[in-house]
Image (spheres, rainbow, N blue to C red):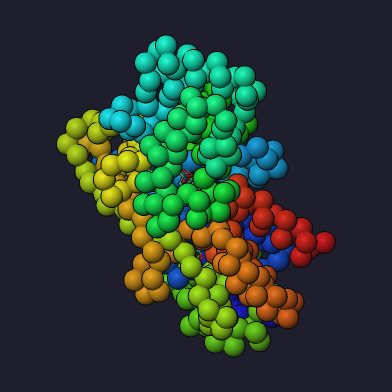
Amino acid sequence: MSADKDINLVVGAGFSGATLANLLANAGEKVLVIDKKDHIAGNCYDYRDENGIMIHKYGSHIFHTNSEKVWNFLKQFTDLNTYMHKVVGYLDGIETHIPFNFNTLYDVFPHSFAKRLEEKLLDVFEINTKVPILEFQKQDDDDLKFLANYVYEKIFLHYTTKQWGVSPQDVDGAVTARVPVYLSKDNRYFQDKYQGIPLEGYTKVIKKMLDHPNIKVELKTNFHDLVNVDLRFKKIFYTGPIDEYYNYKFGQLPYRSVNFKFETHNKEYYQSNACVNYPCNYDFTRIHEYKYYLDDKSDKTVIAKEYSEFFELGKNERYYPIPKEENDALYRKYLEESKKDANVHFFGRLGDYKYYNMDGAIERAIELFEEVCK
Ligand code: FAD
Ligand code: UDP
């Protein structure tokens, strides 16, 4: 595809970039998608290894959404299994359910005490409500105070310190609210209407999204190495880091990074569940066992231990924007700067500096397309 002013440039071939490229292409626009990595799919990249196990290179990805629009968009490119994610974790050496729910309560405490707590909880809260831990700590009753401190200490304090480098009070409340105390017997991690794993993996989904006569994809191509960008492209849609685009003129937006240590074991299964959290023990936060997601059959199994670390430019990758007022203020400076150029649109987890799940990234790309093409 020769470069001319009829072509739109999409930077980044993750879910955000691929969604937008697909919509533009279907609307008759020509699109060049570039990615600096040697593969498409961004952080959702997966592949089958030599044992036939689908590996999620950048950590387990479970699709879940309440948005019919997003679900229908995704379903054009794949069927999904009916996998509903559950997480277990070790509290006091007992393998039990996370988020903390009534089943967890009965697993970790003697029956009579658990019953008393359950009754008291149901006096205060409606059944099936979700209570963020920082809210849950505001209890008057001594038993419930004890329970709140137990949940805070055993599930949130050490895990959050490992994951974010600070205690739960010092991360945005929305982060820990992703895993609330759930006054329910529902052991699932997500209650969304639609959940599952694409039957042939995420990379194939994104490949299909990009497989269009109006789309050309160039990998191992860094935006910053392109020349005459303004002259060459109709519009630029940018899912890379917004601070990097502006050469960090207002300062660097902080991120957390993750280091996955992979191990192959000569046994059918390593652990009882796809994801086991270690809120109190070890330096890693959780262990993923990949064969569970698509029920892959092999006499071997592959796991990854997840270690969180600070993002450092040139050393590791950006994984998690850090929701925090001062970071948001810095992001807004870049956002203001971006408004000076009507030809460049930022979106995606790095472009918007937002902790999007996959459905949020797709939804945002659909909205951007509707806004730009209205
Ligand atoms: P990305 O996937 O990061 O894609 C951005 C792309 O831009 C990258 O491929 C990058 O190489 C490219 N790029 C950046 N700069 C440049 C440049 N200068 N030139 C060229 N290319 C560039 N969501 C869920 O819904 N469920 C989950 O279970 C889930 N688990 C997760 C687990 C982890 C550990 C992480 C980190 C995220 C998880 N997510 C999950 C979130 C999910 O990964 C994101 O919502 C999704 O990947 C966002 O897609 P994106 O396209 O915005 O960003
Ligand atoms: N969290 C925790 N203990 C757990 C699970 C989660 O403290 O066992 C907190 C932690 O701060 C984490 C946040 O809840 O970063 C959100 O967890 P989630 O599993 O949604 O994070 P992600 O899958 O995005 O890494």
Residue 138 in the figure: left or right of residue 264: right
State whether residue 6 appears in this view: no
Residue 309 in the figure: left or right of residue 193: left
Find the residue positioned furthest to the left.
Answer: 266
Residue 195 vs 336, above or below: the answer is above
* Camera-nearest residue between 193 and 354: 354
Residue 132 position within the rendered picture, expressed as x and y whole percent measured from the top left: 56, 39
Tell me the residue at 68%/40% (across/down): 67
Q: Quadrant of residue 318?
A: bottom left
Find the residue positioned furthest to the top.
Answer: 112
State whether residue 88 appears in this view: yes
Tell me the residue at 38%/37% (across/down): 154
Q: Quadrant of residue 288?
A: top left
* Camera-nearest residue between 146 and 22: 146
Residue 164 vs 156, above or below: the answer is below
Tell me the residue at 62%/31% (across/down): 193
Residue 261 position within the rendered picture, expressed as x and y whole percent measured from the top left: 27, 52
Residue 87 vs 69, above or below: the answer is above
